[in-house]
């Protein structure tokens, strides 16, 4: 066994929070090392957020070209070069990884490539990718080990070798018929992208609606937008059996309200959820407790059951967004400096990058009903925003939930630039402003955010007491 090397700080996992904590600690003068088995920078810049949105944008360009005649530009029907789509994505990833390597060099944190497992509290044995072993101990340990795609235990599915969100980013063809299991964020973004690349696409979800965490009106609007582009969506439908091999030919046996159905396809993409990367790395030996789903159990300060060991990002059960992982880092950083930051008081936004996108922050209508929170609801079609008259991007709606004190409690938008408009509303929510301040703000013409004025004119008056 290699001789133990002692560090001030040891980070396991090169996700957003892991990188930031390593760089911060090293810049503070502490001897710091980060161990990463494969993805320098984590999943977001390599195989998740950024690469997928890169290809989503390529698909949008293809869609615009196909509809160019509507805007007065005459083109022949577009032909998709999927190898170039992939290369554009790869070039972006290469540049991003170089920037992450630069972050380690500039901070002085050591980047160690290898697979680690705990052999004792705060003691990690690392099997180096280049060969050999190192044993690292540290005063402080930070876990940022992420999650991976869940493959449901359905007869024939695993042996069919389905695509995951990682695999589909590396194919250089548009499947003849792509079956997507799961109607969540990942599944729907790829569904629309590959439909625009020319694939026939079917989405299968076992739940009664797609994007199950959203309000019904949001799910219905997105479903209609995708259906209008030719995507078939099957809800309340279970996959019973798979025969064949993805990439060649597969036959799926489905069971829905109308009975069983057999569906022929060329490829399967599994997008049914995530599993934490907590198994088989000795966390129990390190004294780190897990919850009943396999995520690391943490308190509101992201401290684990082991002294001086923290968990950040998805592995700690934090919402699975890069921006939340970044905030996890800020919470830990500030608390180590004597602060009192907590995960319990965060206003977390989300955005699904379909076209148009769906953005949300705060309370949802169904949650308000479930919790008995009185709200007034304002709603307006995106087509009422003046800017859409010039762009033609008029699908979707805006919806706000306003409390008795006139503060905005929740906001949802489906429409062009929804994420940017949401950020303006989120700022008002964070400031605790009454909705009238945003309604009466002078916002530049012609922007999508300008629509907030007439939209908030629709807030119903308070009920008479």
Image (cartoon, grey):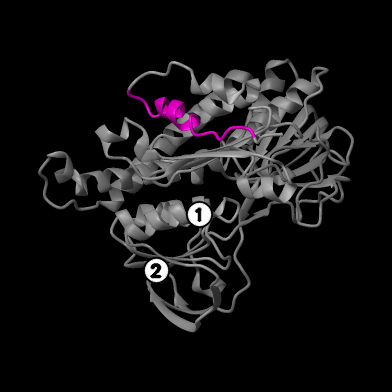
Q: Quadrant of residue 360?
A: top right
Q: Which mark is residue 294?
A: none
State the residue position of label 1: 219
* Secondary structure of the residue carrying numbered label 1: helix
In the depicted structure, whether residue 173 falls above or below residue 464: below
Please report the bounds of the magenta region as a residue range.
446-462
| Residue at image point 27% right, 48% down | 63
Q: Earlier in the sequence, mark 1 or mark 2?
A: 1
Task: Characterize the local packing of mark 1: few (<14), some (14-19) or many (20 or more) Cα atoms within 10 angstroms.
Answer: some
Residue 456 forms part of the magenta stretch: yes
State the residue position of label 2: 247
In the depicted structure, whether residue 283 falls above or below residue 104: below
Q: Is residue 104 visible?
A: no
| Residue at image point 65% right, 36% down | 463
Q: Quadrant of residue 53?
A: top left
| Residue at image point 45% right, 25% down | 453
Please identify the residue farthest to the front as the structure is shown: 464
- Is residue 56 toward the left or the right of residue 209 in the image? left
Task: Characterize the local packing of mark 2: few (<14), some (14-19) or many (20 or more) Cα atoms within 10 angstroms.
Answer: many
- Is residue 100 toward the left or the right of residue 418 in the image? right
| Residue at image point 57% right, 50% down | 214
Q: Is residue 201 visible?
A: yes
């Amino acid at each position: 066994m290699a001789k133990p090397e002692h560090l001030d700080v040891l980070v396991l996992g090169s996700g957003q929070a892991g990188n930031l904590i390593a760089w911060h600690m090293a810049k503070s003068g502490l001897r710091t090392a980060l161990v990463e088995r494969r993805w320098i920078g984590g999943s977001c810049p390599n195989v998740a957020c950024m690469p997928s949105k890169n290809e989503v944008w390529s698909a949008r360009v293809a869609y615009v070209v196909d509809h160019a005649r509507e805007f007065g530009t005459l083109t022949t029907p577009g032909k998709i070069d999927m190898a170039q789509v992939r290369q554009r994505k790869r070039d972006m990833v290469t540049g991003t990884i170089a920037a992450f390597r630069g972050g380690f060099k500039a901070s002085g944190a050591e980047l160690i490539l290898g697979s680690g497992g705990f052999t004792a509290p705060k003691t990690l044995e690392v099997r180096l990718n280049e060969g050999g072993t190192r044993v690292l101990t540290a005063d402080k340990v930070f876990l940022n080990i992420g999650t991976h795609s869940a493959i449901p235990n359905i007869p024939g599915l695993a042996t069919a070798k389905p695509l995951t969100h990682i695999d589909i980013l590396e194919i250089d063809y548009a499947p003849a018929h792509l079956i997507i299991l799961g109607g969540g964020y990942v599944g729907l973004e790829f569904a629309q992208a590959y439909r625009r690349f020319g694939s026939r696409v079917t989405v299968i979800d076992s739940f009664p609606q797609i994007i199950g965490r959203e309000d019904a009106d949001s799910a219905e609007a997105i479903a209609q937008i995708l259906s209008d582009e030719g995507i078939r969506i099957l809800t309340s439908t279970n996959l019973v059996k798979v025969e064949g091999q993805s990439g060649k030919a597969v036959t799926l046996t489905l069971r829905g309200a109308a009975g069983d159905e057999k569906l022929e396809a060329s490829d399967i993409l599994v997008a049914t959820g995530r599993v934490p990367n907590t198994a088989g790395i000795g966390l129990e030996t390190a004294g780190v407790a897990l919850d009943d789903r396999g995520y690391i159990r943490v308190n509101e300060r992201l401290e684990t059951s082991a002294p001086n060991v923290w968990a950040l990002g998805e592995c700690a059960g934090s919402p699975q967004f890069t921006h939340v992982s970044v905030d996890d880092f800020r919470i830990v950083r500030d608390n180590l400096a004597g602060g009192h930051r907590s995960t319990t008081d965060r206003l977390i936004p989300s955005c699904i990058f379909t076209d148009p996108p769906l953005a949300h922050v705060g309370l949802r209508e169904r949650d308000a009903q479930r919790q008995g929170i009185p709200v007034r609801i304002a709603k307006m079609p995106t087509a009422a925003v003046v800017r859409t008259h010039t762009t033609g991007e008029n699908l979707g709606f805006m919806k706000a939930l306003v409390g008795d004190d006139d503060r905005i409690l929740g906001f949802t938008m489906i429409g062009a630039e929804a994420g940017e408009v949401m950020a303006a509303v989120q700022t008002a929510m964070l400031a605790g402003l009454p909705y009238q301040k945003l309604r009466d703000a002078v916002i530049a013409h012609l922007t999508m955010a300008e629509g907030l004025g007439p939209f908030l004119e629709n807030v119903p008056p308070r009920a008479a007491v």
